[in-house]
Image (cartoon, rainbow, N blue to C red):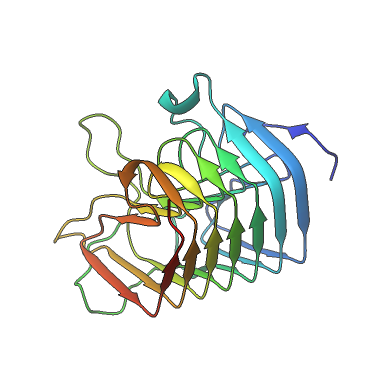
Amino acid sequence: LPEGSIMHYGACISSLSSQGNMNVDYNTFTNVEVINGHGGAIYAFVQSIDIQRCTFIKCSVSGNSESSDPSAQGGAIYLDASSGEGEETIKNCLFENCSSTYSGGAIFAYCYDQNNTVGMPAFHTIKINDCNFSYCKSEVEGGAISSGIKLGGKPVEGDDDINIFHCSFVGCESGRGGAVFSQDGTESGGEQTTISSCQFINCFAREGEGYAISCRSYSISMSNNEFKDHK
């Protein structure tokens, strides 16, 4: 991939077919940039996605006026799962020095909104497993991973079930949720966030809200995680 590629909505891979499935395996994305758009390397609007064994280095998105512009989300990947019908999986990937001037320094997920009973199996879940995030940053929310969006007094959009398992986060930073941020959940929506067997080292939230994690889902499950050296 050429260095310094600039294109709206996924400089390297852009899939806008809500009816399709996407598989991305063993790819490397380096020095990729999107200006006034989402998804530095990959923008995916598909029914299901499987991204495995990929490397993302210095992938970024930037807006018009730094942190005030929400049109810059997902430094490496923007996942629009609003039409999701299958699993959305990101596994065994490396994210290094990825950034966004709004949210999701490495990954932004616009989840499939559905009403769901807490504790029951979810129809649709985004899974991020066995990934490493190093020195990923955003200005507003989620230095590495962010899901859902809330603009002004409008209701939260794009928040639902997300599962983060056996991932490491080192030196990630944002305004809120130095490594991970998820938006407000409701009882009717039954949003569930599960974070387990992850390691958080030296992460930082400039506004003091969740140096490692800021999670507002209706149901939160965290187990076997390690937190170390937060500023």
Q: Is residue 219 above or below residue 12?
A: below
Q: Position of residue 155 (x, y in %)?
A: 22, 40
Residue at position x 55%, y 53% in the image:
171
Q: Nearer the viewer, residue 174 or 16?
A: 174
Q: Is residue 201 visible?
A: yes
Outermost residue to the right:
2
Q: Is residue 113 above or below residue 52?
A: above
Q: Nearer the viewer, residue 24 or 214?
A: 214
Quarter location, residue 219: bottom left
Q: Is residue 54 left or right of residue 180?
A: right
Residue at position x 71%, y 63% in the image:
54
Residue at position x 38%, y 50% in the image:
177
Q: Is residue 28 left or right of residue 108?
A: right
Q: Is residue 112 visible?
A: no
Q: Nearer the viewer, residue 98 or 123?
A: 98
Q: Position of residue 141 (x, y in %)?
A: 40, 43
Q: Is residue 110 left or right of residue 74?
A: left
Q: Position of residue 212 (x, y in %)?
A: 40, 57
Q: Position of residue 170 (x, y in %)?
A: 55, 59
Q: Is residue 195 above or below residue 177?
A: below
Quarter location, residue 123: bottom left
Outermost residue to the left:
187
Q: How many marks?
A: 0
